[in-house]
């Protein structure tokens, strides 16, 4: 049962994060990941948020991250001409790090405003740890 919810969540996240044919937005624009995932958490049923943030359902959260990373990997390979390994590294770094920071905020492990969290996610996603530590 939890796996079917995880699959459903992964499908919804991929629809939010992958560009649809004819759109002009880019998945690497500053704040793109934050804006899309923030909207998801604001609009998603509480159960989805619970599945993604609860330690008891970490297996389901890992399944969601893995499936989203697979979809993003394919998109990065096609859209940016990356090798499979490079696309996989980018996709996993982005989705795992971004969802983890949302989980920390939602579960109260870090206290910061939405704007502060967005700034942190953008800094990490665009410039890595080196850029984050300099900001």
Image (spheres, helix red, strand yellow):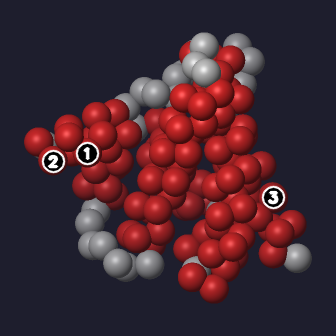
- In the depicted view, which residue is nearer to us: 58 or 9? 58
Task: For label 2, count other residues whose C-alpha is less than 10 Å away and answer few (under 14), some (14-19) or many (20+).
Answer: few
Give the quarter of the image for residue 21.
top right
What residue would you read off at disc 1? 129
Q: Quadrant of the C terminus?
A: top left
Q: Is residue 130 above or below residue 81?
A: below
- Residue 130 as seen in the image, left or right of residue 23: left
Distance from disc 1 to disc 3, alpha carbons, whole Å, reads 32 Å
- Residue 114 as seen in the image, left or right of residue 46: left
Distance from disc 3 to disc 2, alpha carbons, whole Å, reads 36 Å
Give the quarter of the image for residue 65.
bottom right
What residue would you read off at disc 3? 8
Q: Nearer the viewer, mark 1 or mark 3?
A: 1
Image marks 3 and 2: residues in contact by CB distance under 8 Å: no
- Residue 39 as seen in the image, left or right of residue 12: left
Q: Is residue 112 above or below residue 132?
A: below
- In the depicted view, which residue is nearer to us: 100 or 93? 93
Question: Residue 133 bears which disc, if any?
Answer: 2
Q: Nearer the viewer, mark 3 or mark 2?
A: 2
């Amino acid at each position: 049962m939890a796996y079917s919810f995880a699959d459903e969540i992964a499908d919804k996240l991929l629809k939010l994060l992958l560009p649809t044919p004819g759109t002009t937005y880019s998945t690497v624009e500053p704040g793109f990941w934050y804006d899309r995932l923030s909207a998801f958490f604001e609009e998603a049923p509480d159960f989805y948020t619970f599945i993604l943030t609860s330690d008891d359902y970490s297996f389901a959260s890992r399944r969601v991250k893995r499936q989203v990373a697979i979809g993003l990997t394919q998109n990065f390979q096609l859209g940016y001409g990356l090798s499979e390994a490079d696309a996989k590294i980018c996709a996993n770094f982005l989705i795992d790090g971004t969802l983890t920071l949302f989980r920390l905020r939602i579960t109260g492990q870090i206290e910061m405003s939405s704007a502060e969290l967005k700034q942190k996610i953008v800094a990490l996603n665009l410039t890595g740890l080196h850029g984050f530590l300099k900001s």
